[in-house]
Amino acid sequence: MQIEKYKIDEHNQSMLKEHRRRFDFIAAGVSDAEAILKKLIDFQVAIPSWALGTGGTRFGRFSGGGEPRSLEEKIEDVGLLHALNRSSGAISLHIPWDIPGNPAAIKALAAQFGLRFDAMNSNTFQDQPGQQYTYKYGSLQNVKKEVRRQAIDHNIEVINYGKQLGSDSLTVWLSDGSCFPGQLNFRQAFQHTLEGLQEIYAALPGNWKMFVEYKAFEPNFYSMTVGDWGQSLLYASKLGPKAYTLVDLGHHLPNANIEQIVALLLMEGKLGGFHFNDSKYGDDDLTVGSIKPYQLFLIFNELVEGMDARGMDHARDLGWMIDASHNVKDPLEDLLQSVEAIMLTYAQALLIDRKKLVATQLANDAVAAQEILQNTFRTDTRALVAEARLRAGAALDPLALYRNERVREHLVKERGAGTVATGL
Ligand code: RM4
Ligand code: MN
Ligand code: MN
């Protein structure tokens, strides 16, 4: 299914008057609205291929119908999102869930929807049918050389798929670790993992980046071999200039100060990419901004400040990806909400008066600093983001248009009610 251009125009026309009123109001209070709009139009968030179907939990999966049955249909779904918001111009694939049978054709199909391929993700956290050695006791960390070899070869195969699709980065997330004290030797697990990553790193094309994603817990609950940003940074530093840390918002211990982590990684030039989601307890993979919007704002504050300090291009110099998936919502609606939350928060971070904030810091004025941050956080940026969408040819209210057009019903009709997408 595709959303025709004229449907978007009709939708926008019907909302235009009210939108203008709201946009003029916010624009009047912003000194550089045009520059901000340009940044918002440029900013693109990659959609993970595994979030297009309804995600499951340990206890079950309740598929919602009309889920994509193939990589082609996943691309079509991301194409729909991108047509609606013009901010989802990339897709992040997981191998082997999304092996491109004919990479050239897949690349061409994506291009038709204006999509490019963001980071490729390897998977050594599950055993695949017909696989020779099991990852039950880890992959790159494994005490058995043949298991490590298999995991390295898989990652190199993922790079090769990525090359054919025009991707330029590899995300390595390992579930390696241990469930019980004494199960493994920490130093040996680290060394094996490092050696494996070094071989994979050596296979990266010149312009590629490697993202080392950390996670504090799950599926291993005593130790994780890439358990926090310190360990990830250690690997990335030892690997070399093409290796970076990837921050997934759900991968920290409770109450971690993620904004501080982000600031320091940026300072070191070692923040490579981001997995957006939200959580109440752990790696809940909930809709971005649904639980802790103020934390997201504080993170974006550090992102913008840190990128500007290094003269980085907000849209291109970091990998922006969503990593969310759950049991309850229509996955496409969930992704529209996630992208919207990211855009609104990014817009807020762009509005922060940095000069004033620095002045409050120099004066040790914690009250004034809080006023600046919270006044900005309470600024309604919806009309600004909507204006950016309007100028980019997207819908003023993507979710409303999605519902009015009964997209899910069309997808169920086309694909069937019982389809289950590959993924979590
Ligand atoms: C992990 C991690 C990875 C993602 C997998 C599916 O928890 O967040 O980024 O690829 O889940
Ligand atoms: Mn992730
Ligand atoms: Mn995760």
Image (spheres, rainbow, N blue to C red):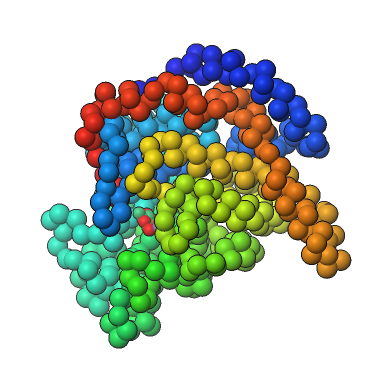
Q: In the shown orientation, is residue 363 left or right of residue 265?
A: right
Is residue 109 or residue 228 the one in the foreground?
A: 228
Is residue 210 or residue 387 the one in the foreground?
A: 387
Q: Position of residue 254 (x, y in %)?
A: 50, 67
* Residue at horizontal 64 percent and vertical 35 percent from the top: 382
* Residue at horizontal 42 percent and vertical 59 percent from the top: 283
In the depicted structure, whether residue 233 falls above or below residue 423: below
In the depicted structure, whether residue 27 falls above or below residue 302: above
Q: Would you say residue 350 is visible in this rendering? A: no
In the depicted structure, whether residue 179 falls above or below residue 15: below
Ligand 1 falls in quadrant: bottom left
* Residue at horizontal 29 percent and vertical 31 percent from the top: 66
* Residue at horizontal 59 percent and vertical 41 percent from the top: 343
Query: What quarter of the picture does the N terminus occupy?
Result: top left
Q: In the shown orientation, is residue 59 left or right of residue 130?
A: right
In the depicted structure, whether residue 390 falls above or below residue 273: above
Is residue 334 or residue 249 the one in the foreground?
A: 334
Q: In the shown orientation, is residue 354 left or right of residue 170?
A: right
Q: Within the image, what quadrant is residue 419 found in?
A: top left
Q: Position of residue 296 (x, y in %)?
A: 59, 53
Q: Position of residue 182 (x, y in %)?
A: 30, 86
Q: Position of residue 94 (x, y in %)?
A: 33, 49
Q: Would you say residue 215 is visible in this rendering? A: yes
Q: How many marks?
A: 0
